[in-house]
Image: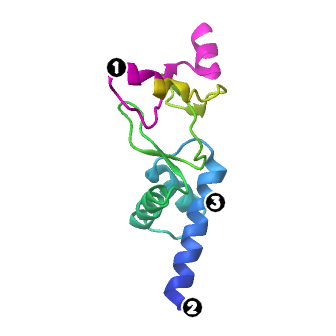
């Protein structure tokens, strides 16, 4: 294995580990910043490329929310997201994915392959701040 391949493997591992550790559906920029702050030398371009390639390969998911940069999620199974309109926090909804919604659209002459639902509101912390 060449030195370059070893470094690339190390960088991919560092990016993947950061994505798991952050657990907040980060953008590529957020991952790059996290790596930089933790003293890891990985270029922004590499972070963008590695995350995009991993999503293309189905190893991670792209999360495209209204008005937001693409975010990444290590969970690849279909699920819904909660998006705080105040702080921008994104979390997974504890709600089962409803596959049957896709087939129900066939009555409209539309054959859905998947669906994504984003719930917009306030996270617990922001709701509490607004009460105070």
Residue that label 3 marks:
17
Question: Does 103 sit above or below residue 12?
Answer: above
Q: Answer whether labels 3 and 2 touch (C-beta < 8 Å).
A: no
Q: Nearer the viewer, residue 46 or 99?
A: 99
What range of the chain is rendered magenta? Answer: 104-132
Q: Residues within 10 Å of mark 1 (few under 14, many from 20)?
A: few
Residue shown at the point (64%, 52%) measured from the top left: 20
Q: Answer whether labels 3 and 1 touch (C-beta < 8 Å).
A: no
Q: Nearer the viewer, residue 15 or 131?
A: 15
Question: For the residues marked 2 and 1, what is the alpha-carbon distance in whole angstroms?
Answer: 54 Å
The reply to whether residue 131 is in sight is yes
Task: Tell which tag, 3 or 1, sits nearer the viewer.
Answer: 1
Residue shown at the point (38%, 32%) measured from the top left: 111
Question: Does 28 sit above or below residue 93?
Answer: below
Q: Secondary structure at mark 1?
A: helix
Residue shown at the point (48%, 60%) measured from the top left: 57
Tell me, yes or no, whether the highlighted magenta stretch contains residue 111.
yes
Q: Secondary structure at mark 3?
A: helix
Which corner quadrant holds the N terminus?
Answer: bottom right
Residue 88 placed where, x, y %? Answer: 49, 30
Q: Answer whether labels 2 and 1 touch (C-beta < 8 Å).
A: no
Q: Residues within 10 Å of mark 3 (few under 14, many from 20)?
A: some
Tell me, yes or no, whether the highlighted magenta stretch contains residue 124.
yes
Residue that label 2 marks:
1
Which tag, 2 or 1, sits closer to the chain's start?
2
Question: For the residues marked 3 and 2, what is the alpha-carbon distance in whole angstroms?
Answer: 22 Å
Q: Quadrant of residue 56?
A: bottom left
Which tag, 3 or 2, sits closer to the chain's start?
2
Residue 83 placed where, x, y %? Answer: 51, 27
Which tag, 3 or 1, sits closer to the chain's start?
3
What number is the disc on residue 108? 1
């Amino acid at each position: 294995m060449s030195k370059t391949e070893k470094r690339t493997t190390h960088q991919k591992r560092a990016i993947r580990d950061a994505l798991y550790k952050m657990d907040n559906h980060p953008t590529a920029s957020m991952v790059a910043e996290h790596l930089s702050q933790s003293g890891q030398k990985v270029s922004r371009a590499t972070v963008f490329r590695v995350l995009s390639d991993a999503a293309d390969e189905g190893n991670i998911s792209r999360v495209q929310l209204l008005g937001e940069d693409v975010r990444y999620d290590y969970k690849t199974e279909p699920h819904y997201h909660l998006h705080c309109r105040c702080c921008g926090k994104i979390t997974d909804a504890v709600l089962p994915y409803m596959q049957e919604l896709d087939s129900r659209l066939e009555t409209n002459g539309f054959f859905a392959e998947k669906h994504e639902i984003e719930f917009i509101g306030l996270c617990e912390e922001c709701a509490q701040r607004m009460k105070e």
